[in-house]
Image (cartoon, helix red, strand yellow):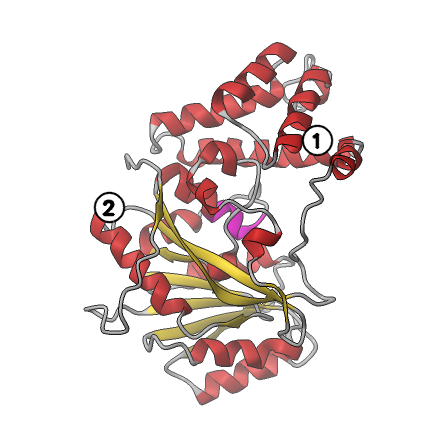
Amino acid sequence: MGFGCECVILEAHCGEGDLGDRVEVEVLLATFNGARFLREQIESILAQDYEAVRLLACDDGSHDGTVEILAEYAEKHPDRFRVLTDDEPSGSAKANFLRLMQAATADYVCFADQDDVWLPGKVRRSIEVMKALEEEHGRATPLLVFSDLRVVDDQLKTIHHSMWKQMEIAPESAARLERLIGRSVVTGCTATINRSLLELARQMPEEATLHDRWIGLLAAAMGKTAFLREQTVLYRQHGSNVIGATAPDNSVTGTIVRAQHDAGRRAERRRCEQEAEALLRLHGAEMPKRQSDLLRAYLRSGRSRSAVERVVTTLRYGFFRPGLLRSLALIWDLARTKSDERLSSKERPGS
């Protein structure tokens, strides 16, 4: 598959009329002890102004009434709500979503967290953009559409109107593999993907840190990406969030404090490198040469024995972090770290 990559900014407002053929959309809902907010989320999905929506849910060993709620909705909406049954908990949201992806049957798939609320036009707007992508690039191309979110508290009161602004996320970077490889940009609960991207994502390896991060990398490396600047999800923040929205501290002081946490920063870099290796292992032969070359350059930028090569490669390919201070901290880190600290055990001399 010789797919290129680009990010398409689509902000045209397509009317409220029919989309032509009303394609079916399957919403993958992963749950674990989510009874407190689950009904509100399910109702917001069933109430979408796009009618051809059905849910596929999978619970990961809840003991708070979540399973009973899912069974209730499956009985009440047998044509629109299905629950996967699995006796063995997977142990992670990533693995639970992988189960759902492997069981999905629709041509278009969305991902839902158990504690958010979807705004009424989320699915319709995403499919409008998806259809525009398909017209330009064809249905065989792996396609991803995602959007901004409104950050709210547990009572749905607005904390920040835009998560992108709060966390200083540049959605355009979702199409630039050199920027995406070091940072998550796509939030899974806003994402819609087509069948072609779903088939790729079903091969998600152990090295993938999160399902949405892996899907974003696949789309950047092998497909096309579009985004909506509008907020389509109320992203609820509460004490039980697995992952939350926290504004970065980009002050000089904040950057210096982060720079002192060498172990954590290097561990994060290793995780990113492992994802790059997994992309090359699984899809290197089918992705565009420019993208595979870029992934190999990323590995050299962290693992070369030469500090000069590490820095020059980073500058040449633009493997920067968001914000000038963080990019400078990255360059400083690459320049001063001993090479053996950056090599995996397989690459160290004598191993």
Quarter occupied by the C terminus:
top right
CA neighbours of label 2 inside 10 A, class few (<14), some (14 to 19), many (20+):
some
Q: Is residue 198 found left or right of 111 in the rendered image?
A: left
Q: Which residue appears at 31% of the width and 57% of the height?
A: 130
How many numbered circles does the render carry?
2
Residue 77, quarter of picture:
bottom left
Q: What's the magenta bit mostly, secondary-structure-wise?
A: helix
CA neighbours of label 1 inside 10 A, class few (<14), some (14 to 19), many (20+):
some
Q: Are marks 2 and 1 in contact (CB under 8 Å)?
A: no
| Above or below for 94 versus 224 | below
212 part of magenta stretch: yes
Quarter occupied by the N terminus:
top left
Q: Position of residue 175 (x, y in %)?
A: 41, 40
Q: Position of residue 176 (x, y in %)?
A: 44, 36
Query: Which region is colored magenta?
Result: 210-215
Residue 13, quarter of picture:
bottom left
| Above or below for 256 versus 87 | above
In depth, the one of 303 and 324 nearer the eye is 324
Looking at the rendered structure, the secondary structure element under dot 2 is: helix
Q: Position of residue 266 (x, y in %)?
A: 70, 31
Q: Which residue appears at 78% of the width and 33% of the height?
A: 256
State the residue position of label 1: 266
Q: Position of residue 341 (x, y in %)?
A: 72, 21
State the residue position of label 2: 137
| Three-letter code for the amino acid on which mark 1 is drawn | Arg
Among the two numbered marks 2 and 1 on one chain, the one whose residue lies closer to the N terminus: 2
Residue 201 shows which numbered tag? Answer: none
In depth, the one of 235 and 33 nearer the eye is 235
Confirm whether residue 342 shows in the render. Answer: no
Q: Is residue 338 found left or right of 91 in the rendered image?
A: right
